[in-house]
Amino acid sequence: MRESSHSLAGLRQRIAGIAASGGVESRPAEGRMASGDARFDAALGGGLAIGRCHEFFAADALDATSAAAFAALVALRTPGTAPLIWLRTCDAGRRGGRIYAPGIAELGGDPDRLLLVEASDPKMLLACANDAVRCAGSAAVIVESWGQFPLLDLTAGRRLALGARDAGTALLMLRLNAAPAPSVAETRWSVAAAPSRALEADAPGAPAFDLELLRWRGGPAGTRWRLDWNHDEKRFEDAALSGALLPLPARRTMASRGAAAA
């Protein structure tokens, strides 16, 4: 895991070297980042589209870690050595905690593929994101912010989306402790921690996620999944007793979901 809080010049050179050695060729077939779960991927046409922007919101502030973990695990599933660029503000790092390389390895990911960049403020984060999405050769770019992000308006979002499209990079926006707003994202998700299945002797089970598709430009939204992470096979799978996909009322929002749970 590499860290930097300044220029992306060295990062660009590193990614260019990976691309020259064949890193770009290791991208998933048909431009998709597949989760590994057949039903989930089939519903999205093969997985999350590469070259597009995808937003992940925590259903609750306490679910910020789950939202970050789900986005990162999808990106780290991509085969080969292409790097995953993770951009975050220093404030997000303080609130969300440090990224733990041995933990990524325990989940089956390769922490050496993770290039971490911490920006001093949202303005610097946006500047770094505009540079990073144009670095062809990465598996994905994750941009993590905490709270509302006024600088990320429709104009700024479109600039990022165009950069991701031109470079063929998946752009994953982690919008933690924030409410959804109009954007150019291809998909928008609400992510929450789900109860895991205990292992033998009541040992902690694998990470589990409740997912709600809030918006999708390519099809209908309002669908929910519950997925477990299988670290042995490095893929997601249907949680036990998850049943059929559950359509939600068209006007259901994250706020109403929280109120119902209260």
Image (tube, rainbow, N blue to C red):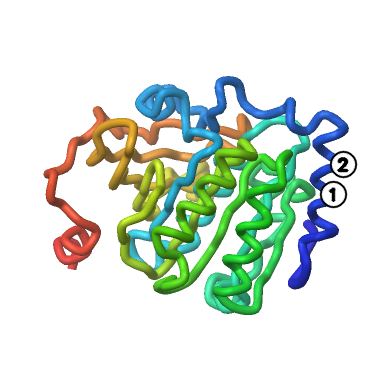
Q: Is residue 128 left or right of residue 261?
A: right
Q: Is residue 177 left or right of residue 251?
A: right
Residue 88 circle label: none
Q: Is residue 190 left or right of residue 206?
A: left
Vertical placement of residue 157 versus 74, above or below: below
User: Mark 2 touching mark 1, by CB under 8 A?
Assistant: yes
From the viewer's side, name the closer residue of 161 and 65. Answer: 161
Q: Residues within 10 Å of mark 1 (few under 14, many from 20)?
A: some
Q: Give the spatial CA distance, label 2 vs label 1.
A: 5 Å
From the viewer's side, name the closer residue of 123 and 214. Answer: 123
Residue at 32% x, 39% y is: 216
In this figure, which residue is indicated by the disc labeled 1?
Answer: 14
Vertical placement of residue 20 versus 118, above or below: above
Residue at 33% x, 59% y is: 59
x, y percentage for residue 6? 77, 71
Residue 17 circle label: 2
Say which quadrant the N terminus sits in.
bottom right
Residue at 66% x, 40% y is: 139
x, y percentage for residue 163? 58, 47
